[in-house]
Image (spheres, rainbow, N blue to C red):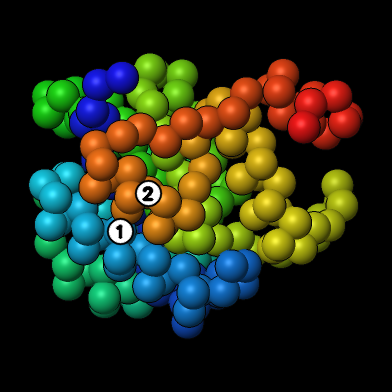
Amino acid sequence: MSTPQRALIVIDVQNEYFDGQLPISYPPREHTLPRILQAMDAANLTGIPVVLVRHIAPAGSPIFADGSHGAALHPEVAARPHQLLLDKQHASCFTGTGLDAWLRERGIDTLTICGYMTHNCDASTIIHASHDGYQVELLHDASGALPYRNAAGSASAEEIHRVYCTVMHTGFAAVAATGDWLAAVASGSALVADNVYTSHLRATGKLD
């Protein structure tokens, strides 16, 4: 297997998720932010391009309003080197941003995803990238979720994060801890996802 040509995609690490209206609760943001910064530092040391992404809503929006404190990148993320900064209005980092062309011009074939939220912009970007032929990695301890309750039901942030990571690992992305990703970067190796079939067999006790 050839050495992955990676880019690190740091999604929506914005103030809204820290001291704004949508504080990330699982894994706790005080745990995930250091892992995000660790991944950024490692990428910059090893020549992996770093792409920062911000979600921007129209002025007056209750969240991510253009020009607001909540829409700004977390200062520790903003202070680190990066090769590209993109603003988006949709969940996927590819929609309306030109990201795909930028990656392909640089021969990138593998995307490492970190940031927020696991079940929204991370998942949308992962599925989009997977369908477009990229290999994808998700750093589960460098991403996070919120709890939800609506007419369809309710779920804790922990449930949402766990379920989305489990589903992503069935083939959309290789889901791993930041430490395992750092080891893969150091060795020039790829992280490997599972698949739907074997994941189901394990769940039904038909495969150890």
Residue 39 is tagged as: 1
91 vs 7, nearest the viewer: 7
Which residue is at a point 83% across and 57% down the rendered structure image?
154
Classify mark 2: residues with Cα within 10 Å, few (<14), some (14-19) or many (20+). Answer: many
Q: Which mark is residue 18?
A: none
Q: Is residue 60 left or right of residue 67?
A: right
* Residue marked by disc 2: 181
Mark 1–mark 2 contact, CB under 8 Å?
Answer: yes
Residue 71 appears in the picture as rendered: no
Does dot 1 land on a helix, a strand or a loop?
helix
Query: Residue 134, percent across and down?
Result: 36, 24
Front residue of this view, candidates 206 and 144:
206
Q: Amino acid at mark 2?
A: Trp
Q: Height in image: 51 above or below 134? A: below
Q: Residues within 10 Å of mark 1 (few under 14, many from 20)?
A: many
Distance of label 1 from label 2 (alpha carbons): 9 Å
| Residue 28 left/right relative to 70 | right
Q: Is residue 194 left or right of residue 81?
A: right
The quadrant of the image that shows the C terminus is top right
Q: Secondary structure at mark 2?
A: helix
Which residue is more in the foreground, 66 or 139? 139
